[in-house]
Amino acid sequence: MDAFTLDVIALLSLVALVAGFVDAIAGGGGLLTVPALLTAGLPPAQALATNKLQGSFGSLAAALHFLREGYVSLREMRLAILCTFIGAGLGAVAVQVLAHGVLARVVPVLLILAALYFVFSPRVSDVHGERRIGDAAFALLIGGSVGFYDGFFGPGTGSFFVLGYIGLLGLSARVATARTKVLNFTSNFAALLFFIAGGKVVWAVGLPMAVGQFIGGRLGAGVVIGAGARVVKPMLVAVSLLLTVKVLLENGGALL
């Protein structure tokens, strides 16, 4: 890791701070950190693993803040947390043996649908809406599948969790974002454990970035509580569209 000078590490930590702020509000912080790690010279596997390390700190900071403010009850979320953990662990194992081709075709479609939903749906507000499924069904359907997605691929995980909480459980933007960060930390941590076991994490880079992520996550969580849907909705739309463009550009040939 001789190539990583203090200047490079400081710049990566600044990127992580911004990513943590964005991620706490709408998800998609990996859109900033993964390209930054790749540009800095990390091989793809190490970049993904190191990204999980620093991202875990950002989602942890946001989740702790929401817990202290009373927006989250871990007891009520225990089944969703368990399903998310199992799903993310399975995804992290699967990514080591499966190709990304099929998923690369599906992700842009999902991201476009998510962006359109947040643009046109009046349900993205600070008022609770209609519940469509029970907590157990949500834990299995959203916790398990989105957790698997995060362990396997990752971009847009936070947006998908928020979409599920608002569209299926009818939660307000603030509460949906708060619960999302708990599940986001769960999936990050589960995947990280498997990357550590595989020896892929670059600690000398990931730990300084983790400091930036923690600060950014805490600041972003405060913005969500203070501004609610006025900030969450446009951020969700912007992140969804940016992720869509990024994935389309990277996988344009495979999608045709």
Image (spheres, rainbow, N blue to C red):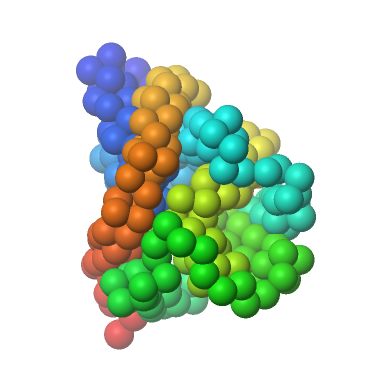
| Residue at 42%, 30% in the rendered image | 218
Q: Where is residue 123 in the image (x, y as percent from the top left)?
A: 42, 70
Q: How many labels does the image show?
A: 0
In the depicted view, which residue is nearer to us: 20 or 208?
20
Q: In which quarter of the image is residue 20?
A: top left
In the displayed structure image, the side of residue 72 where residue 106 appears, left or right:
left
Q: Position of residue 1 (x, y in %)?
A: 39, 22
In the displayed structure image, the side of residue 93 where residue 248 appears, left or right:
left
- In the displayed orientation, state which residue is furthest to the top: 6
Q: Quadrant of residue 254?
A: bottom left
| Residue at 23%, 18% in the rendered image | 7
Any part of residue 144 in sight: no
| Residue at 30%, 51% in the rendered image | 231
In the displayed structure image, the side of residue 53 where residue 253 appears, left or right:
left
Q: Position of residue 185 (x, y in %)?
A: 57, 42
Any part of residue 252 in sight: yes
Q: Quadrant of residue 94?
A: bottom right
In the rendered view, tell whether residue 144 sits above or below residue 211: below
In the rendered view, tell whether residue 24 sits above or below residue 86: above
Which image quarter is the C terminus in?
A: bottom left
- In the displayed orientation, state which residue is furthest to the front: 127
Q: Where is residue 252 in the image (x, y as percent from the top left)?
A: 27, 74
In the rendered view, tell whether residue 156 sits above or below residue 36: below
| Residue at 33%, 45% in the rendered image | 227
